[in-house]
Image (spheres, rainbow, N blue to C red):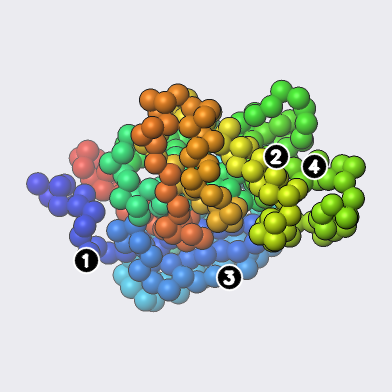
């Protein structure tokens, strides 16, 4: 019965893992146990170039190992990742030269620690779902509304990564046929061209065509138009800003509705900087208008619990859970 004991998530005395979230501008690191951060998170700016990044990761691992004995290290990174080999398959503009890095092997060789590498959005979804105790659900989707839109799919507590490790790239769902907005990925009318912070600004710019400064002060902002200004104007009663924010909710609901009809999720976890501007009741209403009642009536939407630490918590928890899984099917780990 050792395996049952080992897979008991409530064990508070488990050895923690190091969780690291490597982003384009910052690296966050900390110790993780039971889908929680159990140390103060460390934050450093992301150095330039793969060699310097790897050196920074090794320094972080070294300093966290001074604090506690650790079980292993989980790294969430931007880009497409093969989590079996721990290799970066597709780079991201935020981490130039990162593609092709055999990250798992490098870290494992230098530290002798069990290492798991995961795409950052997937790791964040895994962290959030397990931190919220939703691992027993059939399907939970995380939707991160930020500068773009990211996400992850958790089926029966496990990550769904897709056939090419690009599952959950939900920001690139197409939500219009009109070639209205170009997405940063090169395609037209992706969800994130509408439902992200950038999307909200683009919506306001569209509404501002032919509108004067006397009608809304947003018309006079030019290049200074941004999400904060739009939210502030709406709070002051600006009609155009309020209309744009309503449209923003419609845009978010359209994408979520499409996801509902593919996956019939139990719940969504909403995260990211834009999620704090979302009126959950309005979103639920708009979603119900666009979704089969059988799905919409039972659907839950939860706000994020872990915030910016979701990626590092998920990465750390993945290395812990992955090892337990290997043990529970009787393969030498
Ligand atoms: Zn796109």
Task: Check residue 193 in the rendering and tell me which mark sits there, or answer none.
Answer: 2
Separation of residues labelled 3 and 1 (CA atoms): 29 Å
Q: Which mark is residue 44?
A: 3
- Determine the image quadrant of residue 304: bottom left
As helix, strand or loop, the secondary structure at mark 3 comes to: strand
The vertical placement of 246 against 73, above or below, is: above
| Inter-mark Cα distance, 2 to 4 | 15 Å
Please tell me which residue is depicted at 31% across the width and 70% down the height of the picture: 69
Q: Residues within 10 Å of mark 4 (few under 14, many from 20)?
A: some
Q: Which tag, 3 or 4, sits closer to the chain's start?
A: 3
Taking the spot 70% from the left edge, 45% from the top edge, the residue there is: 244
Given residues 209 and 5, the one toward you in this image is: 209
Closer to the observer: label 2 or label 1? 2
Mark 3, other Cα within 10 Å: few <14 / some 14–19 / many ≥20:
few
Q: CA distance from mark 3 to mark 2?
A: 30 Å
- Disc 2 secondary structure class: helix
Local secondary structure at mark 4: helix
Can residue 296 be seen in the rendering of this structure? Answer: yes
Residue 263 percent coordinates (x, y): 43, 28
Pointers 4 and 1 in contact (CB under 8 A)? no
* Residue beneath the point at 60% across and 42% down: 249
Ligand 1 under 8 Å from disc 1 Cβ: no
> Which residue matches tag 4?
207
Disc 1 marks which residue? 13
User: In the rendered view, does 218 fall on the left or right side of 171?
Assistant: right
Q: Is residue 100 visible?
A: no
Real-space Cα separation, disc 3 to disc 4, in angstroms: 40 Å
As drawn, is 200 to the left or to the right of 153?
Answer: right
């Amino acid at each position: 019965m050792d395996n049952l004991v080992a897979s008991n998530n409530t064990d508070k005395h488990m050895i923690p893992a190091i969780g690291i979230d490597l982003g384009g501008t910052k690296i966050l690191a900390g110790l993780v146990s039971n889908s929680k951060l159990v140390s103060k998170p460390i934050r450093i700016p992301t150095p330039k170039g793969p060699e310097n990044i790897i050196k920074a990761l090794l320094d972080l691992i070294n300093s966290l190992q001074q604090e506690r004995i650790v079980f292993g290290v989980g790294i969430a990174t931007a880009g497409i990742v093969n989590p079996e080999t721990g290799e970066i398959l597709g780079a991201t503009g935020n981490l130039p030269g990162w593609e092709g890095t055999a990250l798992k092997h490098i870290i494992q060789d230098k530290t002798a620690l069990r290492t798991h590498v995961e795409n950052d959005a997937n790791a964040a979804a895994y962290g959030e779902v397990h931190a919220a105790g939703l691992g027993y659900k059939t399907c939970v989707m995380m939707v991160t509304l930020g500068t773009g839109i990211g996400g992850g799919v958790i089926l029966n507590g496990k990550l769904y990564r897709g056939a090419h490790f690009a599952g959950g790239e939900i920001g690139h769902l197409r939500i219009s046929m009109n070639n209205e907005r170009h997405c940063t990925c090169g395609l037209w009318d992706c969800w994130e061209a509408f439902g992200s912070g950038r999307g909200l600004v683009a919506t306001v710019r569209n509404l501002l065509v032919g509108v004067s400064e006397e009608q809304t002060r947003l018309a006079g902002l030019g290049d200074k138009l941004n999400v904060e200004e739009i939210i502030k104007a709406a709070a002051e009663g600006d009609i155009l800003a309020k209309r744009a924010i309503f449209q923003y909710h419609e845009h978010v609901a359209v994408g979520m509705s499409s996801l509902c009809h593919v996956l019939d999720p139990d719940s969504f976890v909403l995260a990211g900087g834009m999620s704090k501007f979302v009126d959950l009741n309005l979103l639920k209403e708009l979603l119900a208008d666009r979704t089969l009642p059988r799905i919409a009536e039972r659907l839950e939407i939860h706000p994020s619990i872990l915030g910016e630490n979701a990626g590092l918590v998920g990465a750390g928890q993945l290395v812990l859970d992955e090892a337990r899984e290997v043990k529970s099917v009787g393969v030498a780990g």
